[in-house]
Amino acid sequence: MIPFNERASSKKGKVGERLVDAWLRDQGYVPYAPVVENKAHPFDRIVASENKREIFVAECKTKPARTEYHDTGIDVRHYNDYKHIMEKYGLGIFLFFVDEDKREIYGGYLAELDCQCHEEKPDGSRLLSYPLVRGGIRYFPLSAMLPVCQLTDDEVAEIKPYTRRNKRWEPKPAPACIEDADDVPF
């Protein structure tokens, strides 16, 4: 079995955490990281404002949004853990999504992302109701996310080698434009 820290997903997550840490520091926050070796941790960061007036949990997910829908998500098991922390300790849980395909970091507080709403699929073929749970993942609409920052070319290049995605979910290239109606194949 591959040690936790050697998995591609762990390495990818470390890059995302580092990027979020840098952004948090630039905004006047102090992120505190767990000190664990070669095993999972309960959450990524406890974050405090420099003036000690704010404290919250930051969870970083270094993963692109789904290509077939306007959403992204987290494991239901993690969702339940975060809800427990939120309810028992009164701490806000901010989910940061580091998305190499959209070339940005976005996110929001779990209490706000966990909203009742309806969104169309990008192709307009179907209306989805949120909160949405499928295949052990709880999905949140991108329309509920707050923009955090853009990723540089170098940051995207650092994340991409660790991206493992089923070919079915690869972003599809935009179709070529048809210049003349005579070129339509039907």
Image: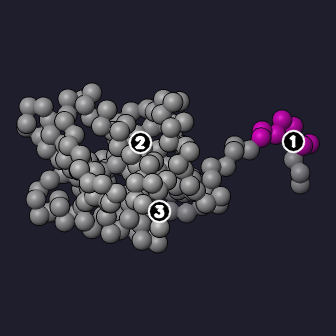
Q: How many marks?
A: 3
Residue where numbered disc 1 is placed: 181
Kind of residue indicated by mark 3: Ile
Instruction: Name the spot of residue 159 as percent of width and height, x first.
Output: 50, 42
Q: Which residues are magenta?
A: 176-183
For label 1, count other residues whose C-alpha is less than 10 Å away and answer few (under 14), some (14-19) or many (20+). few
Residue where numbered disc 3 is placed: 2
Say whether residue 116 is visible: no
Tell which tag, 1 or 2, sits nearer the viewer: 2
Question: Can you say whether 150 is above or below 54 in the image?
Answer: above
Instruction: Name the spot of residue 186 as percent of width and height, x first.
Output: 89, 54
Question: Can you say whether 36 is above or below 75 in the image?
Answer: above
Q: Is residue 177 magenta?
A: yes
Q: CA distance from mark 3 to mark 2?
A: 19 Å
Say whether residue 133 is visible: yes
Q: CA distance from mark 1 to mark 2?
A: 47 Å
Residue where numbered disc 2 is placed: 15
CB under 8 Å between callouts 3 and 2? no
Which quarter of the figure has residue 24? top left
Kind of residue indicated by mark 2: Val
Kind of residue indicated by mark 1: Ala
Image point (47%, 67%), residue name: 1
